[in-house]
Structures are given as C-alpha cells and as structure tokens.
Image (tube, rainbow, N blue to C red):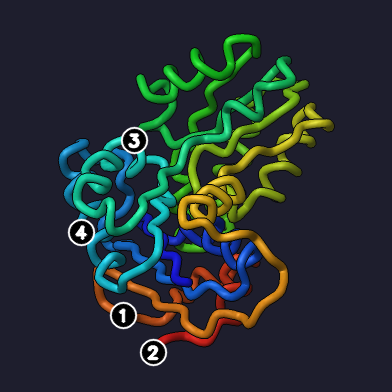
Amino acid sequence: MKIALMDSGIGLLAAAAAVRRQRPDADLVLSSDPGSMPWGPRAPHDVTARALAVARAAAAHRPDALIVACNTASVHALPAIRAALEPDVPVIGTVPAIKPAAVGGGSVAIWATPATTGSDYQRALIREFAAGADVTEVPCPGLADAIEYADEAAIDRAVAAAAALTPSGVRAVVLGCTHYELVGERIADAVRRHGSPGAELYGSAGAVAAQALRRIGAVPTSGGTPGTRLTVLLGGQEAPLPTAALTYLEGRLLQAVSPAL
C-alpha cells in the first residue's frame, strides 16, 4: 500500500504521521514545493497551478490515494486535482475540524491564516456546522512560515499573539492550517494560560488519514510490517526529509521509515 500526501511545505507531516500510526505498513510519498510558499496570499488560479504540479509529481509515483494535506489547496485546487487524477488515484481533501469542535456548542475559536480567516469558505463552514456555537475567527499571521522554518522565537511570538486574540473561556480551538498541528501542544498551553484552562484542540490529520484508508478499503491496524519506503519530493525532485521537519515529533516518526534515496 502506498499513500501520497501533498502540501506547500511541511504541514503535511501531521497527516503523514497519522497515516503512519494507523497503517505502519504503508509506504509514503510526501510531495511539496516549499520554495513557492506561502500559498495563502496567492491568487486562486496560481494556487491551483502550483497545487496541480505538486499533486502530479506525487501521482507519478503511483500511489493508491493522494491526501491534499493543505487547507488552502483544498479550498482552491481540489476540484482541479480530482479532475486530473481521479478515478485512477482517489483524492482526499482537508477540511478544518469545525463540525466536531462545534458539536458541544459554547465558545469556539478557529485559528487560521490571515487569508483563510474571514474568507467565504470558512464562513460557509461556520454557517453549516457551527450555527449553535459562539465562534471567533483568529488570524495567525506568520505562524505557518515560522513553523515551516522551525523558527522557535517566531513561533512563540505568533502563538502568543493569536492566544491574546482568543477569548477567555473558549471550549474548543480549531486548527485551521495543517502546519499548526505540528505545534499543537504549544498552542494549547498558550490558550490555557490566556484564560481557557479547559480548551480542547481540534485538528484534521487523524480524520483525513482515516478517510484516505476508507477510500481504498484499508482497515487501520497497529500490526504488520513497517513500510520500507519514504519518498520525499521537493518541487518534484527526490530529496531527503527537510532538516526543519525533524524539529517536530511527526517528522522524527517518519524518519524511522527507510528513505527511498
């Protein structure tokens, strides 16, 4: 079994690690184009063109499924990627975990990039899935870039700034960018220090990984022979896992897979 994941940068690590935990025997293809990020401020047609290139690079390795592990690419490019690759390769998009976060009602904060915060797409998800909750949209300028380059000081500043904009007493925090899941514990600590001691974080990585397995009829298992190949594509070219990725638990988990190079 081979699962491919794509993103602008290392935000795909969270979903890749989730696949690894649910199916240790799966080979993985990680396709990104960090030289072109961030994608959020780019025009939709530009995002679509770049996402298609990254997706096609992954598809060339003949995966059983492709996860679009990027909120921005899922918003702007998912129909184009599906049109290009399906039915040969099932394509699974990423949607912020607004629905499960809002089930209990109460106060919910959605942390997202400035381009996503207040967007028609996010507002539509709020109307559809969080009508019974008190929702605050929290922009997080610079956080995804800081995580991409493992800039610890910049991560701390961006997390602190977003936590200060998060109302006290929130019950749930939705991580609306896949990069944010890599520093989930730091986000949780910051939110709790700013007056929300019971806040629970909601990411999308686990659900996206499970959906990808369902699409190909695979059952999660903790057993089996570990996958032997990790193929990393940067701008379409095979490369080692970026050094910054090893800063995070998810990256170190994936490093345990023998690289393809």
- Cα distance, mark 3 to mark 2? 33 Å
Q: Is the residue under label 1 in contact with that under label 2 (CB below 8 Å)?
A: yes
Is residue 62 rendered to the left or right of residue 241?
left
The residue carrying mark 1 is: 238
Q: Is the residue under label 2 in contact with that under label 3 (CB below 8 Å)?
A: no
**Mark 1 surroundings within 10 Å by alpha-carbon count, few (fewer than 14), some (14 through 19), many (20 or more):** some
Whichever of callouts 3 and 1 sits on the residue coming sooner in the sequence is 3
Amino acid carrying label 3: it is Val
- Give 131 or 211, whichever is nearer the viewer: 211
- Give 95 or 42, whichever is nearer the viewer: 95
The residue carrying mark 3 is: 75
Amino acid carrying label 2: it is Leu
Asked if residue 178 is positioned above or below residue 258 in the image, the reply reads above
Whichever of callouts 4 and 1 sits on the residue coming sooner in the sequence is 4
Amino acid carrying label 1: it is Glu
- Quarter of the figure with residue 116: top left
- Cα distance, mark 3 to mark 1? 27 Å
Q: Is the residue under label 1 in contact with that under label 3 (CB below 8 Å)?
A: no
Query: Residue 261 has which mark?
Result: 2
> Residue, x 65% and y 65% (percent of image)?
21
The residue carrying mark 4 is: 53
> Residue, x 43% and y 24% (percent of image)?
122
- Cα distance, mark 4 to mark 1? 14 Å
> Percent from the top left, x then y, of residue 37?
31, 53
**Mark 2 surroundings within 10 Å by alpha-carbon count, few (fewer than 14), some (14 through 19), many (20 or more):** few
Is residue 92 rendered to the left or right of residue 23?
left
Whichever of callouts 2 and 1 sits on the residue coming sooner in the sequence is 1
